[in-house]
Amino acid sequence: MNLRLSAIITKEEEWYVARCPELDVTSQGKTFEEARENLKEAVELYIESFGTDDISEIKGEPVFTTIEVAA
């Protein structure tokens, strides 16, 4: 079974931080691609440890957008 999950990758100082919000899994890497691959591995380990029962509740494609607020 293949799952399509979200990956949010941000540059934080010298590292790229990758997050999967559906599973609350985070990883990092020195490059964007390394962070993405490390997150993929971390998600696979998460699923190996905890299974896919909770993941079956995830429906639809998430929508990521930005908002502007007064500061």
Image (cartoon, rainbow, N blue to C red):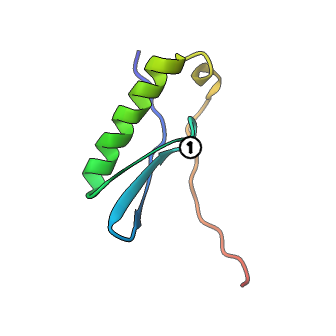
Q: Is residue 4 left or right of residue 66?
A: left
Q: Identify the residue position indicated by label 1 in the image.
A: 21
**SS state under label 1:** loop
Q: Is residue 25 above or below residue 31?
A: above
Residue farthest to the bottom, as pictured: 71
Foreground residue, 25 or 60? 25
Q: Quadrant of residue 10?
A: bottom left
Foreground residue, 17 or 56? 17
Foreground residue, 23 or 61? 23
Q: Is residue 48 left or right of residue 65?
A: left
Q: Is residue 25 above or below residue 48?
A: below
Number of numbered markers: 1
**Image point (62%, 21%), residue name:** 54
**Amino acid on which the number 1 mark rests in the picture:** Pro
Q: Is residue 55 above or below residue 63?
A: above
Q: Quadrant of residue 45?
A: top left
Q: Position of residue 9 (x, y in %)?
A: 42, 55
**Image point (41%, 15%), residue name:** 1
Q: Residues within 10 Å of mark 1 (few under 14, many from 20)?
A: few
**Image point (60%, 15%), residue name:** 53
Residue farthest to the right, as pictured: 70
Q: Position of residue 42 (x, y in %)?
A: 40, 34
Q: Position of residue 71 (x, y in %)?
A: 72, 84
**Image point (26%, 57%), residue name:** 31
Q: Is residue 5 left or right of residue 40?
A: right
